[in-house]
Image: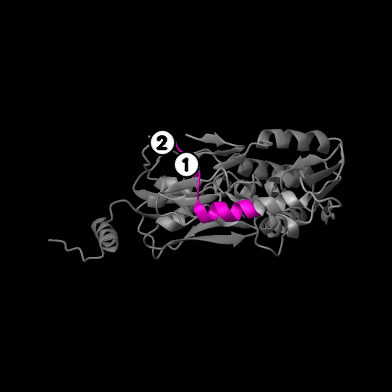
């Protein structure tokens, strides 16, 4: 039940806060430079007037719940591929750079880019990737500059893992005109709108009741693009063992886990699954489906699950189920249920 609002689409049912109120994810609200997105009432609240459509929220969202529509992911992917297959240099420019280049892909802000898009360009044959921005310090979106640097850094590390050393550079150009006044106007407007918080837009349908969604969601498109691009790069070269832990995958402390399977029931992408065949209950993980949304960590009342950083690309690209936990199915479940109820209620549970 998404709704398009002035160039931004939010699929509310894909947000981890909508899936379970225990979610601690704040990625989009922390990334937004203008406070256009807040997380309340177990779903994102979007201020269309505050939004400058920089795309920082969409780039950081692990669930792919947010998409910028100007251009859309599909349009941007098509433009990247059309240039990369010609072994061309791909240039991305922000609207404030004033760089005139017919071959450049123009974006409102370079924060719109994330590693899967740059990896796609490398996988399809781009000879060089260049990002050109205006004077970020004068722009209303200047808070997005660290995320742009982070995107370039992580993309280069992923590429190094596949021994691909295509240059990725960021160039800041000085504006020769007074166009940055537009940015100042944006900053002034943002200040007053934050002060009065007017014209708030809820992306959900007005009459919709917010409930926990138990439907398994597909793996987000950008995560699929990320894995497919890594796979293409890995097929072309020999892999190396990176000293940097670039990936996150869940692990279970078997001394703490009681096999309640809450984590597998809530995992939105089926990365965690339960195998209850025969007399053994098993919890397995398919690393390639994990988007590191932290929801399994948030819902585990035993604190038995953690996301561990690693550098095993083979595991990330594998479709194999990895065993994380197993126990006999006939074990007495009452103690663990009582412990959970006691934790939730803050009172001792007695068995009579």
Whole-percent x, y for residue 189 in the image: 62, 51
The residue tagged with tag 2: helix, strand or loop? loop
Provide residue 28's location: percent of width, then percent of height: 56, 52
Label 1 element class: loop
Q: Residues within 10 Å of mark 2 (few under 14, many from 20)?
A: few
Which range of residues does the magenta coloring cover? 188-204
Relative to 214, 184 lies left or right: right
The magenta stretch spans residue 162: no
How far is the residue under mark 1 from the one under mark 2? Answer: 8 Å
The reply to whether dot 1 and dot 2 touch (C-beta < 8 Å) is yes
Q: Which mark is residue 206?
A: 2
Residue 25 visible within the image: yes
Q: Residue at x 85, y 37 (%)?
A: 103
Q: Based on the picture, tell me whether residue 190 belongs to the magenta stretch.
A: yes
The one of 210 and 45 positioned closer to us in this rendering: 45
Left or right of 61: which side holds 267?
A: left
């Amino acid at each position: 039940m998404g709704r398009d609002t002035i160039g931004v689409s939010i699929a509310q049912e894909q947000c981890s806060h909508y899936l379970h109120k225990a979610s601690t994810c704040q990625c989009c609200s922390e990334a937004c430079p203008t406070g256009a997105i807040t997380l309340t009432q177990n779903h994102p609240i979007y201020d269309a007037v505050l939004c400058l459509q920089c795309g920082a929220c969409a780039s950081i969202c692990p669930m792919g719940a947010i998409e910028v529509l100007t251009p859309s992911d599909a349009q941007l992917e098509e433009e990247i591929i059309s240039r990369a297959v010609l072994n061309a240099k791909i240039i991305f420019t922000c609207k404030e750079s004033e760089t005139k280049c017919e071959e450049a892909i123009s974006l409102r802000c370079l924060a719109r880019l994330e590693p899967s898009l740059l990896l796609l360009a490398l996988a399809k044959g781009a000879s060089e990737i260049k990002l050109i921005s205006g004077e970020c310090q004068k722009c209303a979106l200047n808070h997005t500059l660290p995320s742009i640097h982070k995107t370039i850094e992580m993309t280069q590390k992923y590429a190094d893992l596949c021994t691909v050393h295509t240059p990725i550079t960021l160039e800041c150009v000085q504006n020769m005109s007074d166009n940055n006044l537009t940015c100042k106007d944006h900053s002034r407007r943002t200040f007053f709108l934050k002060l009065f918080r007017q014209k708030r837009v809820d992306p959900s349908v007005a009459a919709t009741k917010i409930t926990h969604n138990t439907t398994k969601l597909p793996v987000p498109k950008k995560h699929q693009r990320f894995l497919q691009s890594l796979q293409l790069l890995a097929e072309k070269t020999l892999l190396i063992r990176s000293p940097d832990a670039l990936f996150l995958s869940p692990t279970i402390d078997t001394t703490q886990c009681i096999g309640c399977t809450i984590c597998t029931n809530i995992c939105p992408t089926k990365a965690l699954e339960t195998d209850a065949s025969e007399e053994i209950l098993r919890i397995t993980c398919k690393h390639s489906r994990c988007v590191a949304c932290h929801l399994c960590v948030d819902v585990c009342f035993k604190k038995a699950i953690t996301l561990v950083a690693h550098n095993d690309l083979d595991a990330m690209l594998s479709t194999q189920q990895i065993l994380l936990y197993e126990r006999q199915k006939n074990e007495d479940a009452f103690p663990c249920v009582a412990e959970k109820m006691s934790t939730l209620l803050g009172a001792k549970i007695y068995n009579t």
